[in-house]
Structure formats: structure tokens, C-alpha cells
Image (cartoon, rainbow, N blue to C red):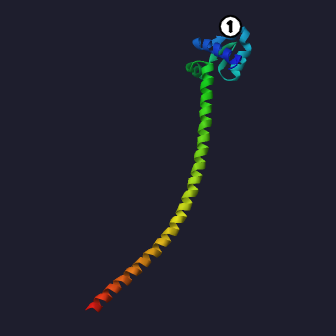
Amino acid sequence: MTELDNKIDEILLEVCKTGMCQIDDFPENREIFNVMLSRGILHNLGGGVLHTNDLSYKICKRGGWLKHLEIEEKIESEKEDKEKLEIELAKSNIKANKLNAKIAEQNKKDKRSNKIAMWINISIGIINLAAIIWQLLKAE
């Protein structure tokens, strides 16, 4: 964290106590107020009066600017990790789809082979049945 971040944290925690401040109350920090205004942390009501807004309320509720930066950094890091995991998952799904296509093709070949084997077995069964009937007739 920079010195600027430390100063923003200090001023914002003070401003959040009342919800507003006069720029003249902090004459040495005009530059910091300009930074806070540009980042949308405070709202300028005019006449040198600055007011808190939804963002500044959220930041104060989180424990200040420094804590807010830590949380945002953590969220960004988790988001990057999630994106990396999603990419890995997509790659894995592509590999699985290719493997499923190969298995489906092999199953088609196996189905044809199974049909041929079934007809061979039926034919052998008919031949065996005919041989049994022939032997029975011959035995009589």
C-alpha cells in the first residue's frame, strides 16, 4: 500500500463518522480529496462540502480504504483463479468429448462384430440341433 492509500484510509474513516466534511477542514489534503473525488469515493456537494456516497459507505463498512483494497485484490485474485480453472475444465471437456467419440465409434464396430458372432452362434446351434435330431433318428 502506498502513502496515498494510507492517507485516503485515514481521511475516509474520519469523514465516514459524520458523512460529510469541508475541504477547508483538511487544507493540506486537497490533492487527496481530488483523488478521492476522481475515484468516486466522495461526492462534491459544492461550496467545498464533500459527502459520502454508496461506495464510501461500503468502504467504511469493510473497515476502511486499506481493507477495501485488500478485499478487492482478493476478489480479483479469486476471479483470475476461477478463470484459470474454467479454462482447464474446458480443455478437459474437449478431451473427454474426443474420447467419447472414439468410444462411440468402437461401440459401433463392436455392435457389428456382436451381430456377426450372434448369427454364427445361431447357425452352429441349428447345426448342432440338426446333428442331434439326425443321431436320434439314426439310433432308432
At which x and y percent is residue 35?
A: 71, 20
Answer above or below: position of 80 versus 124: above
Mark 1, secondary structure of its residue: helix
Taking depth in this image into account, of 128 and 45 the one nearest to the observer is 128
| Disc 1 target residue | 25
What amino acid is at disc 1?
Answer: Asp
Answer above or below: position of 138 versus 65: below
Answer above or below: position of 135 versus 23: below
Taking depth in this image into account, of 100 and 18 the one nearest to the observer is 100
At which x and y percent is residue 27?
A: 72, 8
Q: Quick one: quadrant of the N terminus?
A: top right
Taking depth in this image into account, of 49 and 64 the one nearest to the observer is 64
At which x and y percent is residue 79?
A: 60, 35
Q: Callout 1: few (<14), some (14-19), or many (20+) C-alpha neighbours within 10 Å?
A: few
Q: Viewed as shown, does residue 6 lie left or right of 102?
A: right
At which x and y percent is residue 30?
A: 73, 13
Q: Residue at x 31, y 87 (%)?
A: 133
Q: Residue at x 40, y 78 (%)?
A: 122
Q: Quadrant of residue 32?
A: top right
Q: Quick one: quadrant of the C terminus?
A: bottom left
Q: Quadrant of residue 68?
A: top right
Q: Residue at x 31, y 88 (%)?
A: 135
